[in-house]
Image (tube, rainbow, N blue to C red):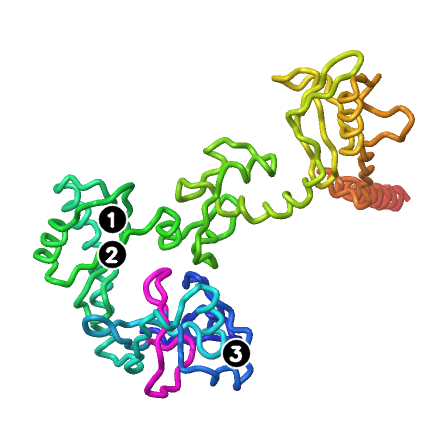
């Protein structure tokens, strides 16, 4: 068993000699790690178990716990084995962030630092989890239950197993529990989770190239609607909006308040603009440049004209007065479209042959030297 340590306040417990590996889900950086007073403000510690399951326990025995220690904690029944991921004042901050009420939350105890026999039993229990999950899926299918068992977690002492499942509706799994208890000879606990929670437990890489948000920092999930995508002028194609969990990506909500604030004074996009020559319909919007593009055809891009938000509001106000403008672009003012910045190739990095000139020059110089040397040798031999 590798010795678990933690360096520089990072909350990722890893093998000794390495800093901040990414094996832990929902990591928390302890930015108060170098302040001894902050570690003594509370006896509560944060303990993490398999994947994203965390719990808060009281160190009633005054053990000298550090982040990365394997501890035996109170469970019903028996005890469980987990890793200490946070101590001190930041534990209280995490409890507040996760909206946990200590009055209602039953705070269990930390028994001891895990002994070798505790760790051996824990390793044996973990080794059975994959086979148990596969077998339980077969049993659920044989009972014709509309559910998917996504993960199985054994308690540290092997006396209980938690089965995490996904289902669209309510599932009567009383018969399933009887069969599972008879097959695996352990206490069975069923926990229903959502698709986002399952993605966080499994983990993975998102289309942005980074690890999934639900596996790195998100613990509370809010609903994401297609209205947020429309507000940001994103494609409402489900294939592009869906994440690993087949739900709308959580990151669609991240910039939503900024777009709402920026679009407060924008005119409605369903209002056409009337000119003497044609009627223009909204095509697209550049929110942060405050530019709106209109098309003379309602269904396709035709005769596109880009104007500022202020000019669009002027044309709408004129149309409401019963007037039709000569052109969407105000001829009396400067063009509203910001000119594209001229790209100057300073170092020539866009050229695939940027090194060829120097090579050809050197080759020519070497060839000239050889020719002069050969001519000198010929003269000397003739003399």
Query: What is the CA distance from the residue labelled 1 to the residue labelled 2?
Result: 8 Å
Find disc 1 in the rendering and name its residue: 149
Q: Is residue 49 magenta?
A: yes
* Residue 6 higher or lower than 49, as above or below: below
Horizontal arrangement in the rendering, residue 323 relative to residue 45 (left or right): right
Instruction: Name the quarter where the C terminus is drawn.
Output: top right
Answer whether labels 3 and 1 touch (C-beta < 8 Å).
no
User: Which region is colored magenta?
Assistant: 48-70
Q: Quadrant of residue 74?
A: bottom left
For the stretch drawn in magenta, the main secondary structure is loop
Residue 178 on the magenta segment: no
Q: Nearer the viewer, residue 278 or 16?
A: 278
Q: Is residue 347 visible?
A: yes
Residue 356: x and y, percent? 75, 40
Give the image location of residue 227, x and y in percent: 53, 37
Q: Which residue position is annotated with label 2?
A: 152
Residue 370 visible (yes or no): no
- Residue shown at 16% from the left, 45% from the top: 138
The residue carrying mark 3 is: 33
- The answer to whether the residue labelled 1 contacts the one labelled 2, judged by CB atoms less than 8 Å apart, is yes
The earlier-in-sequence mark between 3 and 2 is: 3
Quick one: label 3 or label 1, which is nearer the N terminus? 3
């Amino acid at each position: 068993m590798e010795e678990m340590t933690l360096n520089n306040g990072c909350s990722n417990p890893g093998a000794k000699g390495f800093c901040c590996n990414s094996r832990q889900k929902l990591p928390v950086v302890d930015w108060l790690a170098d302040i001894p007073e902050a570690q003594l403000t509370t006896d509560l510690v944060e303990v993490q178990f398999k994947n994203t399951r965390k719990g808060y326990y009281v160190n009633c025995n005054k053990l000298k716990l550090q982040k990365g220690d394997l501890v035996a904690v109170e469970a019903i029944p028996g005890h469980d084995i987990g890793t200490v991921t946070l101590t001190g004042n930041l534990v209280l901050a995490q409890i507040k962030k996760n909206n946990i009420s200590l009055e209602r939350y039953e705070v269990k105890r930390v028994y001891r630092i895990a002994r070798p026999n505790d760790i051996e039993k824990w390793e044996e229990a973990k080794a059975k989890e994959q086979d148990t999950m596969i077998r339980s899926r077969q049993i659920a299918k044989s009972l014709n239950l509309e559910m998917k068992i996504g993960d199985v977690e054994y308690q540290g002492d092997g006396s209980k197993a938690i089965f995490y499942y996904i289902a669209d509706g309510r599932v009567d799994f009383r018969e399933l529990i009887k069969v599972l208890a008879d097959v695996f000879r352990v206490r069975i606990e069923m926990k229903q989770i959502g698709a986002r929670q399952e993605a966080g437990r499994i983990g993975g890489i998102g289309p942005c190239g980074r690890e999934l948000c639900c596996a790195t920092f998100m613990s509370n999930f809010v609903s994401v609607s297609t209205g947020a995508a429309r507000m940001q002028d994103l494609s409402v194609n489900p294939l592009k909006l869906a994440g690993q969990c087949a739900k709308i990506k959580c990151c669609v909500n991240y910039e939503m308040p900024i777009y709402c604030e920026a679009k407060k004074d924008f005119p409605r996009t369903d209002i056409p603009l009337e000119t003497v020559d044609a009627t223009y319909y909204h095509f697209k919007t550049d929110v942060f440049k405050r530019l709106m593009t209109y098309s003379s055809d309602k269904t396709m891009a035709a005769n596109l004209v880009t104007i500022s938000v202020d000019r669009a509001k002027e044309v709408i106000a004129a149309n409401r007065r019963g007037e039709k403008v000569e052109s969407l672009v105000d001829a009396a003012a400067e063009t509203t479209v910001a000119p594209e910045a001229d790209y100057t190739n300073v170092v020539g990095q866009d050229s695939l042959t940027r090194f060829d000139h120097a090579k050809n020059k050197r080759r020519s110089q070497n060839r000239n030297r050889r020719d002069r040397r050969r001519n000198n040798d010929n003269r000397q031999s003739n003399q």
